[in-house]
Structures are given as structure tokens and as C-alpha cells.
Image (spheres, rainbow, N blue to C red):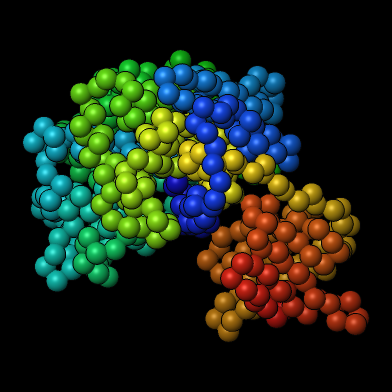
Amino acid sequence: MIRYAIARPLAGLVALSLCLFLAGGLDAREDLKPQIDAVAEPLLEHRMTVGVAVGLLEGDSVREFGYGRISRQTDRKPDSRTVFEIGSVTKVFVTLALSDMVEEGRVKLSDPVAVYLPDSVRAPQFEGQQITLGHLAEHTSGLPRIPNNFTPSNPLNPYADYTAEKMYDFLSAFTLPRAPGSCYEYSNLGAGLLGHVLARHTGLDLGALLQERICRPLNLVDTSIRVSPDGQLRLTPGHDLDANPVPYWDFDVLAGAGALHSTVADLVLFVKANMGLLPTPLFAAMEKCRAPRMVTTLGDWHIGLGWHVSADGNTAWHNGGTYGFYSFIGFNRERKVGLVWLSNSSLWQIPDVNARLLDILAGRSAEPMKFKTPVPLPAETLDRYVGEYRPAPDATLRVRRDGTRLILQNPEGAETALFPESQTRFFLRETSETTVEFVLDEGGNTVRMDLHGKEGDKSAARVR
């Protein structure tokens, strides 16, 4: 899943496997539609999403479902041909293009990325060890998630003005913290760099490269970086968790990290091909992409080329997110189950969504999504908590009011909405594991903020 650095870290990837290894079972022949309903319907009921389109593969059968609406201005449901931004799901297309080029002998996974960059660019090394194309594909390059010269002029469309020149400047100045290949660290920069060098090597732009190698061979008619005029008519607007419309994203040099748009219909074909249910010359390259290469930081999940995979390689998945969209694709070859989920809201902020979709793939019953309902508080009560709080001498948390809720800003600038569940206690819509409580003195003045979470309790004294 992809997003700018001020947002919550690439949501969806951390702790997604927490529910995956719980006991229980669901026969693959059982109707999985109620499981999907259990995830989608509470999200709609609590207005966490505007619309969802789902594709479900069970053996040779494919079913497609639409929930909610394309936008707040229409009652039309999203369907299999509604176009969505798919964010980081783009990465498995880029790594498949790489794997296919390896199959043809055009490149090698062991090729240093420096070979494919201009001579003027100094690709970072660690004690003489170079970053390879394989390192970029498996997120072991040592490059950070986002470069430190990533300073978008429009934070709501953050990747639009990050150019090749900026990336080259960063690479030439960056020092790798460890040897490439030694440690998994998810990197949008690395994925974007991979897409860039593959395009540069072929003389095509990335969109044309993906069309040539993947989309046309698989007949993916709506999967593209630039949406066609016909696709524009079917492109749903994106929304935040409060159902407010947000801008679409544009990409420059880091397009390989998350620039694709697609539909349920196209992604079902893509998943079927990866499961071996759709004959394609790309299958050998697909198999290499889902071969486990290294353990990740996500529980027992491994990384293949792009895909997050089980240790036996039977289950593979990837998710994605922009500020207005969330996507998930995955499959379990042993159970012959595949799943595509596209939402026109930023559900990547709610890790429980990913966990339940993984449960469905694994054959376990997905528990219905549960959300708290805010209690109404007057503005004067909320204003009592507005101010600055210090959890540590060098860190400041800021709280402001936004209508009927509070907004908590962390020291890096990321913001989280707080919703009241009592006079002093607030919850985060995206997780039930964290609450915030404001502590008052005898005179009713706010003196501190206590944060209660899975990892323990922390206090921050009010300083202003």
C-alpha cells in the first residue's frame, strides 16, 4: 500500500497477519459471500467507505459484488468495470514485468541497478556491495520508504512533482545503512526506481512497458497509468474515511510505486492467471514472482518478487492505498480461492480490513467489522482539550478541533481524528486498540493526555 510520508506508515502491511494463524476452518466449498458481507457492510453502515467492488474466485467460478455507491452524488453501485486507483498493487505488475524480462534474458535479477542509470548518477553502495534489480523487487535494497528530499508542493497529490532529477540527487548523496539483501524494508522509492530503470532500459515509458508485457497479453483493457477517455466515464472519485472527496494522484518518476488504475474485471483475470487458471506465456515469470525469497517483518510472511507470500508459496497477496482509495488482491492456490477488493475510500488506514480479507483467503471465518459510535459533545467541551502536549522533552503533540471531533497531530505532522466516546475519552475510527483520555484537575482544566494502546500506556503533559 502507498502513501506520502506525513500519512500513517504504509498502512496495511504491518500486523496484517495477526489474525491469519488463529484456529478454525472454513470449507472452500462454503459460500464465501457472507464472509465478504461481514467485512463490507459494517464499513458502509459506519460511513467508513462510500463504495466497494469485489471479485471472488472459487475454483472455476467467478462472482462479482458491488456495495455502496460510486459517489455521494449517485446511488449507482460500483461494479466490475468501475475504475479505481490501485496504489501499491502496481508493484506486482512492475515485478512481473521484471520477471518476464529475466525469462527472456533481457536483464538479470543480479544486475546492479547502477548499470541502468545515467553515468552521472552514483548509485549508493555498502562496502562495495551494490543494489541489484532483485533487491529492489524484494524490498531489500536498503533504500528508505520515501527519500528525504520528497517535499511535494501539493501534499494531497504528493508524487506528482517528484522528478527523476530529484531521485538522482537523492541516490547520489545517500549512504546505505546496511548491505543490500540483508534485511526486508518496504520501499516506495525502491519500487519506483525499479519501474524507472526498466522503462529506461526498454526505451518505453512505464505505462507503455506494462501495456506491452502484461496488460495486452492478459487482455486487461482498463489497467493503465493514464485512464482512457472511456475509462474516465467509469472512474470513481476517491474519498477519505469521512466520505469527503479527495484529489486523484499523479506520478512522475516513482510511477512504479503506485500509479496504475484498474477494475475488478481486469484484476480477476490477473489473479486467475497467477493461480494458473488462465493459460498465459507469463506463467513461468509469475511463478518466480511468488517464490518466497526472504522473511519479512510481517509475522510469518515472506517476500517474493513484489508479492507477500506464505512460506510454501501457495498464498500471495498485495494491497495498496492512495489518499482516496484502497485495493487488495490475493489468492490461495491450494484452496483455489482468489479475492479482489477495491474501495473508493482510504480503508488502508483500518488494518482490520486487511486481516479479515486474509482470513477469507486462508479459509477462516471473517468476524464482522465492529466500530464504535461517537457520542455528541458540545464545542466548548471539545475546545477544552485543544492545545499542545509533550510526551517527551523533544516531542510535541498538537490537538485542534474539527467540527464534532478532535485532530491529533504527531511530531512528524501526521494527523489522526479522535472521536468522543465519553466526556474525556476518545477513540480512533481506524483501530479499536488505541484510545486517548484527557485528564482534568479539580478546576476542570486539562493537565495531560493519556494514550492507551496495545503496547501500553503513555502520558503527555499539557504545555499550552
Residue at far top of view? 230
User: In the drawing, does residue 271 fall left or right of residue 12?
Assistant: left
Report the residue at 68% width, 78% height from top. 459
| Res. 346 image quadrant | top right
User: In the drawing, does residue 104 fall left or right of residue 396?
Assistant: left
Where residue 375 sits in the image (x, y, percent)? Answer: 85, 53
Viewer-proximal residue among 199 and 422: 422
Report the residue at 31% width, 21% height from top. 278
Q: In this view, does 34 lie above or below 382?
A: above
Tell me if I can see residue 88 in this picture.
yes
Viewer-proximal residue among 352 and 418: 352
User: In the drawing, does residue 155 fall left or right of residue 50?
Assistant: left
Where residue 227 sits in the image (x, y, percent)? Answer: 42, 24
Where residue 118 sits in the image (x, y, percent)? Answer: 13, 49
Quadrant of the image containing the C terminus: bottom right
| Res. 331 image quadrant | top left
Tell me if I can see residue 85 in this picture.
no
Report the residue at 62% width, 74% height from top. 456
Where residue 26 sits in the image (x, y, percent)? Answer: 54, 37
